[in-house]
Image (cartoon, rainbow, N blue to C red):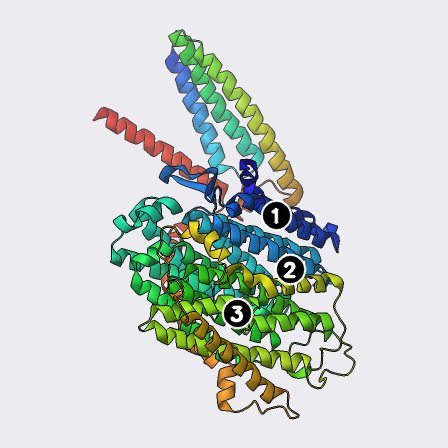
Amino acid sequence: MIVTPGWYLALAAVLFTIGAVGVLVRRNALVMFMAIELMLNSVNLTFVAAGRHLGLLEGQVSVLFVMVVAAAEVTVGLAIIVAVFRLRSTASVDALAEMKG
Amino acid sequence: MQPAVDLVWLVIALPLAGYALLQVFGKRIGEPAAGWIATLLVGAAFAVAVLASIDVVTGEAPHHTIHLFTWIPAIGVEASLLWDPLSTMMTLIVTGVGFLIHLYSVGYMHGEERFGRFFTYLNLFIASMLILVLADGFGLLFVGWELVGLSSYLLISFWFVKPVAAAAGKKAFVVNRIGDLGFLIALMLIFANFGTLAFAPVFERAPEVLTTGGATAITLLLLVGAAGKSAQIPLHVWLPDAMEGPTPVSALIHAATMVTAGVYLTARSGVLFELAPVSAAIVAVVGAATALMAATIAIAQRDIKRVLAYSTISQLGYMFMAVGAAAYVAGVFHLLTHAFFKALLFLGAGSVIHAVAGEQDMARMGGLRRVMPVTFVTMVVAWLAISGIPIFAGFWSKDEILAVLFGRGGWWLALWAVGLVTAALTAFYMSRMIYLTFFGQPRWDDGVHPHESPVTMTLPLVALGGLSLVGGLINTPFKPVLEHFLQPSFDLVEQAHIPEGITPWVLAAVSVAAGVVGIAYAARRYLGETRPDETGPVWELVEQGYRVDDLYGETLVIPGRKGAEALAFTADAKVVDGAVNGTGRLVQVFSTLLRPLQTGFARSYVLGIVAGTLGLVVWLLVRGAG
């Protein structure tokens, strides 16, 4: 069986959907974070797949950028989650609804 | 001697430097050094002015223009100084009398908490007044004009802790502003007609450029400005209140220098007034009405400084009569002698007030001639000078004005008659003041120990006394030195002169008689055993200045306040605020509709993002297919 780029894209789509549904249905901030990471990495997968298919370097370069941004985002996000947890003893995002209009 | 003339800018720069120095360090320098610095700088300015005046006095080079800098390049307005006989004379008065009054203030303001600040303002005033008289053009003149208004305001309300002083300063400022508006419009008209504000081109080209109507409009507006600054009817109301300032200020600003700015302006613009005979006549009539009215009010005052304030208004009326009658030299001559004797009267009054512990009511003075001989003798000189007794300064100048008015004949004779009556009234009220203050029984309170003032105060009194005694001799009919000296400044105008022959001598005799009658009647009335009854409705009406203040209050101030209230509480609060609040409410209504969208649940936002993205994707696919 030949692995065509379509397979990669299909896998990425499945991963992305799992991630998106995870963000939507889970209340735990930590789990939501992991779901977001899943979404980011599914996109990374499409980048490298497309890059390899087209013989371009930009796909891999973009992935490096996404990784850096994701790392930074995780740092800040985890700090926020820890701070909220100390304050509220919970990591549930539904408990944080003060900004209701 | 060109170099000396080039130093004229120093005359302004010295007091200005004093102002800058004292503004920053005045408090630290303190008493008495701050006063001495200010005094010496004005003295130095006087010395420079004397040095620079040599060429002008000898007549070698009567006109000098000192270019300072280009002020407004776009319309070609230059800042330059004019050093001609008229400005020389004014500069010498301002710096000379200013120096004496600075010296006096060192003694008078002794122990004042804000001693340094007082001299700061005094130096600012001198610099401003010098800008006014030295300016070679209406533009720079206006700058000085506004600056003297500012320093006058600062000094009237120097004791701003007293509500009356603060109110008096504000009143002076507002009333002056009305006059300034007239002046400003006149400036615009001049610029519109001539394309320049410099004196020389305006005056030289005036006869060909201006129509009679144009000249009348400009000169009437100039008169509004002059009347505001020189306290002429109907803008005279601020000067009596200005007496709330320290007495040296009254002497310097509100008697000798600033209030004569209107006379100076009119004399300087003589060419324009010559083209508008109606305006010139109005100037003279305003002067006559002011002179007579203020003289009657002065009779009924109890406060020694208010007598002098109304007297100043009255004497300024004389000067306006003179310049209105095209007797510019006579007007400026009276300005000069008046600067001497009125400054002396104010300083003498300050010395008296100082002696009786701040009391200004003449009913609580009396018999002071024995305790303060120097003040008494110098005040007597000033009294005789203003009453027009021969030899003394006021006689020569006042008589010249009256003679010119008589000489013009026709309806001007009515003005002459007014002037004559005013002369008698002047002699009467000044005698009343002298008699009540220095003669009779002592009426001051127990515990007040009158004393002669310190030498820094009596020295200026003596100097001004000397000038009041002989100052008039520089322009006698026998030897009109001042007239020859000033002639180059009035080359472009045709001046009115005193009549030929025996007439002036008869007129002089008549006016001296009027003065003597005034003095004699006052002596009969006030030197007797009993003090005359000074009550009753008429007396009170006159004492309150014919209640002009009340009239203005009811016709202008109260309607003005009502209008402002209507604007504030209706136009602003309802209309303007209503529009602003309405906008706010509109936004609020819309936001109420949108508020439910913000649930506060992060996951619902995520749902929104996902749904939006999906929608976008679907839309792109559909469009791509279509």
What residue is at 32 percent from the left and 73 percent from the top? B411
For badge 2, the amino acid type reads Ile
**In which chain is the residue bearing label 3?**
B
Residue B111: give x, y in percent of width and height. 75, 63
Of all chains, the one bearing label 2 is B
How busy is the neighbourhood of tag 3: few (under 14 within 10 Å), some, or many (20 plus)? Answer: many
Circle 3 sits in a helix, a strand or a loop, which is it? Answer: helix
**Where does the image place residue B91, in percent across and percent down from the top left?**
54, 52
> What is the quadrant of the C terminus of chain B in the image?
top left
- What's the CA distance linking mark 3 and mark 1? 30 Å
Image x and y of residue B77, in percent: 40, 41
Residue at 52% from the left image edge and 78% from the top image edge? B515
Q: Nearer the viewer, residue B531 or B218?
A: B531
Horizontal side of B331 relative to B74 (left or right) equals right
Q: What residue type is labelled 1?
A: Ala
* Percent coordinates x, y for residue A17 in the rendering: 43, 28
Residue behind mark 1: B45
Tag shown at residue B101: 2
Q: Do the residues labelled 3 and 2 touch (CB within 8 Å)?
A: no
Residue that extends furthest to the front in the rendered view of this protein: B501
Q: Do labels 2 and 1 share a chain?
A: yes
Quadrant hosting residue B235? bottom left
Q: Which of marks 3 and 1 is nearer the N terminus?
A: 1
Q: Say left or right for B594 vs B431.
A: left
Q: Which of marks 3 and 2 is nearer the N terminus?
A: 2
Residue carrying label 3: B395
At 50% from the left edge and 59% from the top edge, which residue is drawn? Answer: B479
What crowding class fits label 1: few (fewer than 14 Cα within 10 Å), some (14-19), or many (20 or more)? many
Q: What element carries label 1?
A: helix
